[in-house]
Image (cartoon, rainbow, N blue to C red):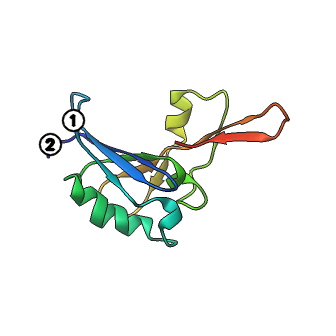
Amino acid sequence: MAGHLLLGDWGGTHLRVWVIGPDGAVQAHKGFDLGVNQLKPGEAAAKFEHEVRPAVGAEALPALLCGAIGSNVGWRTAPYVDCPADFDGLARALTRIPDTSAPVWLVPGIRSKGVTAEPEVLRG
């Protein structure tokens, strides 16, 4: 597949990925029952490299993943970005995963103070 980028939304119960072409069009899409709540500690890397990438022909594509995969129960913690947050701030806060076959970055969640002054957070 001549994709350009692999995008993923990896939540607590499922993973959904899209291969995006150079023109921004979706070239492939697939869902997996690989939610982070079902993974053993340290298992995300192997599942992503050996099951997910090959299933959509994206072994060599850079990947951008959001959702619970960047939480403390995910692959690696991507620290929250405080609100107000913009795309530039989120881009600067991407967390790179080392030692992968092709580059993988985790998108951070965002955080703000709620109406009770307690933090409210969002991932994905």
Could one spot residue 73 in this view of the protein? yes
Residue at image location 51% in from the left, 29% down from the top: 88
Percent of width and height locating residue 102: 30, 55
Image x and y of residue 71, in percent: 58, 54
Q: In the image, 112: left or right of 3?
A: right
Rendered image quadrant of residue 119: top right
Outermost left residue: 1
Pointer 1 or 2: first along the chain: 2
> Contact (CB < 8 A) between labels 1 and 2?
yes
* Callout 1 amino acid: Gly
Under tag 2, what secondary structure?
loop
* Secondary element type, mark 1: loop
Q: How crowded is mark 2: few (under 14 residues within 10 Å), some or many (20 or more)?
A: few
Residue 85, placed above or below residue 60: above
> Which residue bears the numbered disc 2?
2
Give residue 90's position: percent from left, percent from top. Answer: 54, 35
On the picture, is 114 further left or further right than 33?
A: right
Q: Kindly indicate the quadrant of the structure image that contains residue 86.
A: top right
Q: Does 91 sit above or below residue 17? A: above
Mark 1: few, some, or many residues within 10 Å (few <14, many ≥20)?
some
Name the residue that disc number 1 marks.
21
Residue at image coords 85%, 35%: 116
Residue nearest the viewer, comparing 44 with 77: 44
Residue drawn where x is 22% and y is 52% of the image: 56
Residue 35: mark: none
Query: From where the camera sits, is residue 59 visible?
Result: no
Residue type at tag 2: Ala
- How far apart are the alpha carbons under marks 1 and 2? 7 Å
Left or right of 14 on screen, residue 50: left
Quadrant for residue 115, please give it: top right
Farthest residue to the right: give it.
116
